[in-house]
Image (spheres, rainbow, N blue to C red):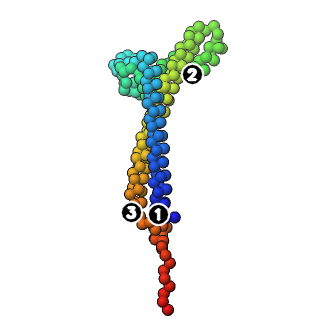
Amino acid sequence: MRRKTFDLLAVIGGLVLTVVLTVAGGLLLWGHNFVSDQVHTQLAAQKIYFPPASSAPIKALPATDAQAMTTYAGQQMTTGAQAQTYADHFIAVHLREIGAGKTYAQVSAASLAQPKNAALAAQVQTVFRGETLRGLLLNAYGFWQMGQIMFIGAIVAFVAAAAMLILSLSGIAHRRHVPAEAEVFGGHTATSPRPAPAI
């Protein structure tokens, strides 16, 4: 195969990949913006605020949970990272205290075994509501995290597209300097047979 033909095919392939990667990066960026906007809007509408750093609710938490909550002390919850912190380091702590370390399923089973126990029935309702809120916040965190991954993917796609464009332009420049007779795996193709040596 002639080198010019090979270079042309490589340039076309590189330009096609550039377009594909650019489109992919644009879609990933759009997905990131959409997810981030939805999570922000839905969380902001709930008007959940983190307790101040020096407040009693923070001081009552175990050291690790208090430290995590202090990161967002006094802030309104608007991001998935905040939702995950609130769910795992605040709600989960209180649920463990209310249920004495038992899950909703375990507390509910105990309540069904003692249908006349009003205190246990109230505990079931409280744990259920807490687990529901925690689950919703963790779902928001999951979608937000997907948006962050999309953003990283968009950056990678754009960088790869830029690299392919540079390589394609280099291929165009290289093709202009390649002799027309050059082969991919060899030197030059002879344009006419050499004359036989004189005897």
- Mark 1: few/some/many CA within 10 Å (<14, 14-19, 20+): many
Percent x, y for residue 9? 49, 56
Q: Residues within 10 Å of mark 3 (few under 14, many from 20)?
A: few
Going by the image, does 166 lie left or right of 141?
Answer: left
Find the distance from the CA under tag 3 to the CA under tag 2: 73 Å
Q: Amino acid at mark 1?
A: Arg
Q: Amino acid at mark 2?
A: Thr
- Mark nearer the viewer, 2 or 1: 1
- Which of 193 and 26 lies nearest the eye of the viewer? 193
Instruction: Kindly tell me whether residue 131 is visible in this rendering.
Output: yes
Nearer the observer, 170 or 68? 170
Task: Residue 63: tell me if it is visible.
Answer: no
Compared with 52, 153 (above or below) is below
Residue at image position (48%, 67%) is 183
Q: Secondary structure at mark 3?
A: loop
What residue sits right under mark 3 in the picture? 177
| Residue beneath disc 1 | 3
